[in-house]
Amino acid sequence: MVRAITVQKQLKAIGASFPFFGRPEIDELPKIMVDGEVIQHIIFGRYEGGYAVLCATNFRILLIDKKLLFLTVEDVRYDMIAELDYGHQFLGATIHIRSFSKDLKFQCFNKQKLRDFTSFIQQRVMELRQHHIQPLNQEESTMPIPIQTFNEPDNQLTPQQAASLIPLNREKWHKANPVPKANNPYVQSPLLTRKRVGRY
């Protein structure tokens, strides 16, 4: 939970304003967000349950629908997104977010805002998948490289020949000793395909 003034500052930083529609949903944001979470994009539109606010933070996607005696909050993590579709029509645009547990379709009249929203989600998903593909972190990059030695009595290699066999920099070392790729169950899981089956 964050302070309401923090949410207002974040909304002001991205130029988002909700003078009439979306105010109840905005008032719910401080109760939903966690420490360190920053709003990147936020739009007002319509989903299957009615009008709502769709918010993209640095951690997740939030859909908030607040009505009298009624509140719906849906949370979609970036690493759970399996497919993302965008399309626009003469009046408005639509984003379709498919995850392994949810299927969310959201419509908005502001095409450019929704397109920027979609681009941000695509970027975050790719960043997370690249992180799983390349698991080396900063601490691993500072670890010393093991050095091969030739101290055996019967070794006939000259110092120049030994130096040619030893990876002298980090790039050559990791090329000779590749790090096994981390398995991301979300990336490698097969996507569901729908197939129409006849009555007989």
Image (cartoon, rainbow, N blue to C red):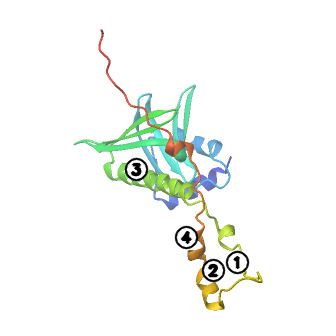
Q: Which residue is mark 3?
A: 118
- What number of labels is visible? 4
Which quadrant of the figure has residue 191? top left
Q: Which residue is mark 4?
A: 175
Asked which secondary structure carries label 4, the reply is helix
Q: Which residue is mark 2?
A: 166
- The single residue placed furthest to the left in the displayed view is 90
Residue 26 vs 135, above or below: the answer is above
Q: Nearer the viewer, mark 2 or mark 4?
A: 2
Tell me if mark 3 has few (under 14), some (14-19) or many (20+) residues whose alpha carbon lies within 10 angstroms of its own: many
- 3 or 1: tag closer to the N-terminus: 3
Kind of residue sitting beneath label 3: Thr
Q: Are marks 2 and 3 in contact (CB under 8 Å)?
A: no
The alpha-carbon separation of the residues under discs 3 and 1 comes to: 50 Å
Q: Position of residue 65 (x, y in %)?
A: 51, 34
Quarter holding the C terminus is top left
Q: Are marks 1 and 2 in contact (CB under 8 Å)?
A: yes
Residue 4 vs 175, above or below: the answer is above
- 1 or 4: tag closer to the N-terminus: 1
The alpha-carbon separation of the residues under discs 2 and 3 comes to: 47 Å
Visible residue check, residue 61? no
Asked which secondary structure carries label 1, the reply is loop
Residue 23 vs 166, above or below: the answer is above
| Closer to us: 114 or 148 | 148
